[in-house]
Amino acid sequence: MPELVETTDPEGVDYGWVMQTTFVLTIAVGAPVVAVLSFGTPLDTWNARLSFAVRVGAVVWVLVAVAVYGYARRTTEEPADQ
């Protein structure tokens, strides 16, 4: 087993965790949301499909990112000396 090269002990919010979790949840939540919302939308061309997916995906990404950051901030223990 190779030796561990580096470890981190972040103070406050662990932004690496926030970014990774946002990425995974955006895909897990965003794909079904885009699929469901696309049923009622006429998407005749590939440009229309791409534009629709980007617009809906961007909204999903922002909402997920804010929620994940809020969760991380709420559950992070603050140092006792503050």
Image (cartoon, rainbow, N blue to C red):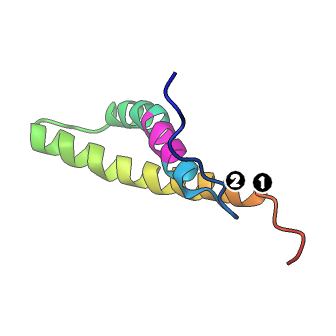
Q: Is disc 1 placed on a helix, strand or loop? A: helix
Going by the image, does 17 lie left or right of 56? right
Query: How far across and down, in percent of the image, does residue 72 sit?
Result: 68, 54
Q: In this image, 80 relative to 43: left or right?
A: right
- How packed mark 1 is, by other alpha carbons closer than 10 Å (few <14, some 14-19, many 20 or more), is few
Which labelled disc corresponds to residue 71?
2
Q: Residue at x 36, y 48 (%)?
A: 56
Whole-number angstrom distance, CA of label 2 to CA of label 1: 6 Å
The answer to which quarter of the image holds residue 79 is bottom right
| Residue at left offset 69%, top offset 64% | 11
Q: Quadrant of the C terminus?
A: bottom right
| Residue 21 falls inside the magenta stretch | yes
Q: Is residue 70 above or below residue 22?
A: below
The foreground one among 77 and 53 is 77
> Amino acid under label 2?
Tyr
**Dot 2 surroundings within 10 Å: few (below 14), some, or many (20 or more)?**
few
**Front residue of this view, candidates 38 and 55:** 55
Residue type at mark 1?
A: Thr
Q: Is there CB contact under 8 Å for labels 2 and 1?
A: yes
Residue 40: quarter of image: top left
- Most frequent secondary structure within the magenta stretch: helix
Q: Residue 76 vs residue 26: left or right?
A: right
Magenta part of the chain: 20-27
Secondary structure of residue under mark 2: helix
Q: Nearer the viewer, residue 13 or 23?
A: 13
Q: Which residue is mark 1?
A: 75
The x and y percentages for residue 13 are 65, 60
